[in-house]
Amino acid sequence: MNKLIFSKINFDTADINKYFLTVLIFIISLFSLTILLSLSNIEFENAFKLAVLTLMNTVNSSAYGISDFDFQNLHFLTKYFLIFFMIIGRVEFLSLLLIAKKFLFKY
């Protein structure tokens, strides 16, 4: 057990590893979607913004600088990638880890 600095809270390093794994899964999915969108002839900056918005299930607006992005001209595979990663973003990674806990973290 470890103790958090300036508090009486104790935490287990296994919990830290689980939360780190969720962040790692998010980063991997973010960069994989960015690469897939870049391969479908979308500029890297717009692909990265669209990947973040897709994984966070956020609405496309002028606040993000891609309000004039045209989804109708995308290839159908690109649309399927966006749908798939939007589902991944909607399902919380922590809940997936809790379901798969007995398979991933055997002690």
Image (tube, rainbow, N blue to C red):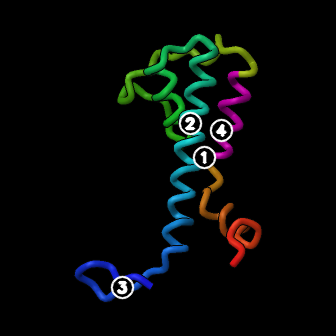
How far apart are labels 1 and 3 at the CA level? 31 Å
Q: Residues within 10 Å of mark 3 (few under 14, many from 20)?
A: few
State the residue at coordinates (38%, 22%): 65
Q: Is residue 84 left or right of residue 54?
A: right
Per the image, the residue denoted by label 4 is 85
What is the quadrant of residue 10 in the picture? Answer: bottom left
Magenta part of the chain:
78-88
Dominant SS of magenta comes to helix
Disc 2 to disc 4: CB gap under 8 Å? yes
Front position in the image: 91 or 63: 91
| Circle nearer the N terminus (2, 4) | 2
Per the image, the residue denoted by label 1 is 89
Which mark identifies residue 9? 3
Q: Which amino acid, by three-letter code, is at mark 2?
A: Thr
Secondary structure at badge 2 equals helix
Query: Is residue 61 within the magenta segment?
Result: no
Front position in the image: 107 or 56: 107
Front position in the image: 11 or 63: 11
| Circle nearer the N terminus (1, 2) | 2
Q: Report the residue that reaches farthest toward the front.
A: 107
